[in-house]
Image (cartoon, rainbow, N blue to C red):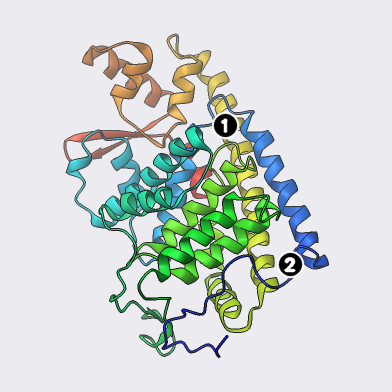
Amino acid sequence: MRKFDRLIPHNDLPLLPPSEDIENNPAILKRLVLATRALATVNGNLNRLPNPLMLINTLALQEAKTSTEIENIFTTEDELYKAISDTNKEAISNPATKEVLRYREALWAGFKELQENKTIETNTIKRIFNQIKETNSSYRPPQAQVVIKRGESEFRSGEIIYTPPRGDGVIEALMDNLVDFLNDDEKYPMDPLLKMCVAHYQFEAIHPFQDGNGRTGRILNLLYLFSKGLLSQPVLYMSKFIIVNKEDYYFKLGAVTQRNAWKPWIEFMLEATEKTAAITNTRINEILSQMESTQEYAKGKIKWYNKEVNEALFSQPYIKPRLIGKITGKTSRTTLTKYMDELVHYKILTPRKDGVDVYYLNEDLLRILEG
């Protein structure tokens, strides 16, 4: 293999599996055990939730926001929570908010697809990308002069740091190898968590799309762990760990490319998995504890309050009256206004006006999500 040159397309990117023996490295194995245990604890905790899918509504939104921030796309929690509590998605004007919501929708769509076939295909990855970017395009065409540059806030901003592979059939061959590596456990008998770490590097190095590769790759991590039974729901959101350790993330990615330094990269990703699992467990515990406390408090004060209403109030932080109407079967505006007034009176929800609309905040859930 020729010496790495950041200005030349990296068509020498080796096919998977890696040449380095990562499976027998003691430091990697130690990290692998810790990460695997942490994931198992998350799965056990998910089973305690009355409706595990509620976490995809709440935590997935936080992941979507943080993941898009890595790509320098910023929106506020306020805009996001209002957007998901509204049915008129066409009324959303903020492009960043739309991008974040598309990320969550792409995660949902990929999750539903894998529930049926359990296998990640190249078309699965393309569909995730298409949903994130709201496009029908496929892999980068051979003539596209795509390069990776330093960010505007970095030293020597705008400098090219990596040129991904390019040419007729090059990306297609690399992506076919990547998907084969993920799916064929007889040909590539590697622990699935290690496969996730390896595949994430390879996907980012291939950089198969014109844009949106980072977000697509992070969704792919989650869906792969789900497809292999390591997660019962796609709720392990590593973007916060990555953004806090962004310099390390990119440095260790580059070290694999330049020096075949797999060990530091895999240790980083396993640490991200372990620590993110610990944070996820804490949030699940806090949500469950708060749900139980709110249910106990409200049922002694509000006659119509029940378990289904309580779960609905923790399905998303911003609530509109129609959600309560859907649960209770009440459609009268007078009745729903009375119900919302009771929830406000007992400080279960807090009203917030936005023009002519009134939203109701579950501040207990907000505190947990943003903590």
Residue 77 point in image, percent of width and height:
37, 50
Residue hosting label 1: 290
Of residues 286 and 228, the one drawn nearer to the viewer in this rendering: 228
Q: Quadrant of the N terminus?
A: bottom right
Residue 259 visible in the picture = yes
The alpha-carbon separation of the residues under discs 1 and 2 comes to 42 Å
Residue drawn at x 39%, y 23% is 343
Q: How many marks?
A: 2
Q: Assess disc 1: are there few (<14), some (14-19) or many (≥20) residues with their C-alpha within 10 Å of its C-alpha.
A: some
Q: Assess disc 2: are there few (<14), some (14-19) or many (≥20) residues with their C-alpha within 10 Å of its C-alpha.
A: some
Residue 182 relative to residue 150: left or right: right
Residue 119 relative to residue 345: left or right: right
Residue 313 point in image, percent of width and height:
43, 28
Q: Quadrant of residue 180?
A: bottom right
Residue 8 point in image, percent of width and height:
42, 87
Residue drawn at x 49%, y 52% is 220
Of residues 102 and 28, the one drawn nearer to the viewer in this rendering: 28
Q: Earlier in the sequence, mark 1 or mark 2?
A: 2
Residue 17 point in image, percent of width and height:
63, 65
Give the vertical position of 321 relative to 231 (above or below). Answer: above
Of residues 251 and 124, the one drawn nearer to the viewer in this rendering: 124
Residue drawn at x 49%, y 71% is 205
Amino acid bearing label 2: Ile
Residue hosting label 2: 22
